[in-house]
Image (cartoon, rainbow, N blue to C red):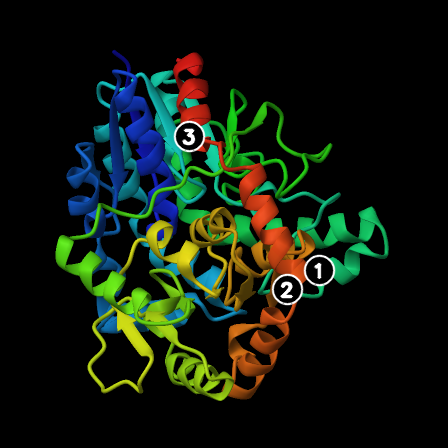
Amino acid sequence: MKRFVFACFGSLGDLHPYLAVGKALQARGHHAALCTTDRYRAAVEAEGLAWAPLRPSEAQMIGTQGELKAVMRRLFDPLRGPEYMVRELLMPHIRAQHADIAAACERADLLVTHPLALTGPLVCAQRGLPWVSSVLSPMSMLSTLDPPLIASVPFGRALRRLGVWPYRGFMQLAAWMAFRWEAPLHALRAELGLPRAEHPALFHGQFSPHLNLALFPRWLAQPAADWPARSLLAGFARYDGAPPSAELCARLDAYLDAGEPPLVFALGSSVALIAGQFWQEAIAAAQALGRRALLVTGEPWSTPLPPGIAAFEYLPYSRLFPRAAAVIHQAGIGTLAQALAAGRPQLIVPAAFDQPDNARRAQALGVARTLPIRKATAARLAHELAALLADAPLAARARQLAARHAGEDGAAVAAEALIAAC
């Protein structure tokens, strides 16, 4: 039996693929532990996997902000969000993160790192421990040949049209800025007696020389010549939570069976916390179209809803999305994976980070339309949804894509690759 440790930081969309791979390893007779924030301890242990802490804790993240929503609002600022994440959320706790990963790896045979588990490579260098890096979405590959759409610098793809070298210059400038943000991490490397980093940890420094596991499929992003060496596209490792209670299933089925398939609005675990007026705009758009709608709000809904509109704090997407007339979502990679598997038309309302690029790729597949969430008024939602629902070829492509890839199991492929890497 081999012992695997996954170090990850982020939202449920970051956690869930590692839970899926951990369960696949466990089914093959191995031990898997997730080193992640205390917010997810119950979710990890509910699946029978081991949990280990990874700081910052939820209380440390909130700090003086007062509540998690305030942290999310700063994090999803389209211009300053990435800097806030690195300089204020991660770097003040970088030594604690190193200590936590080191403790979790005490008896490990292999460490798998998320892009924000910045000290994982340091622990492996100290101990000679095998290390596999992983990415969840194509944006993290940082390709100059297939440049991502980055929310904080939307002009980047336009710059790429001038040629590879201008775009590489732009990316080098971004890497220089990230290197400055990571000053506490570089100081820690020096204290540990490790060589100076050649690349920012947030850029090419995140990739392992042994194996880089891409937890998305080839049909979402074709490998480019400048991808990291030894990259393996495993496919989506889909997971969307523990089975719902019988009471929740009964409530959901009663609503779904009461009328035509609804428009399903779901914003994942992070964007839902800062959705603000979006839910009201969604309700108004559904009413304007004369459609039923179901909202997955991420928190309890306390105000009365119009007839035909329902709100649930949480629902497993794999159970809900296949019964939707259309899925309106933010294009977090986990949500996108479930929407693609459901084979339903999609209206994507991306907010930040990898979401605009994921949305762009879904649109290129011919199964989605996009509308930035900041422009998602009732009128524009209604307009986009009317066009989406009238597009029979798009709906057919969505069904065909889902059917073509129904047998893919990224978690199983990833588990086998990790076992081979030990």
> Can residue 192 be seen at all in this image of the molecule?
no
- Secondary structure, mark 3, is helix
Q: Of helix, strand and loop, which one carries label 2?
A: loop
Q: Which quadrant of the view contains residue 222?
A: top right
Residue 300 in percent (x, y) is at 20, 72
| Labelled disc at residue 121 | 3
Q: Position of residue 87 (x, y in %)?
A: 41, 58
Q: Above or below — where is 368 with respect to 70?
A: above
Q: Is 113 drawn above or below residue 339 in the view shown?
A: above
Image: 418 above or below 343: above
What residue does disc 2 label?
Answer: 153
Q: Are marks 2 and 1 in contact (CB under 8 Å)?
A: yes
Visible in this render: residue 92? yes
Label 2, label 1: how many angstroms apart (C-alpha)? 6 Å
Q: Amino acid at mark 3?
A: Pro
The part of the image, by quadrant, that contains residue 70 is bottom left
Pick whichever of labels 3 and 2 is earlier in the sequence: 3
Q: Which residue is mark 1?
A: 156
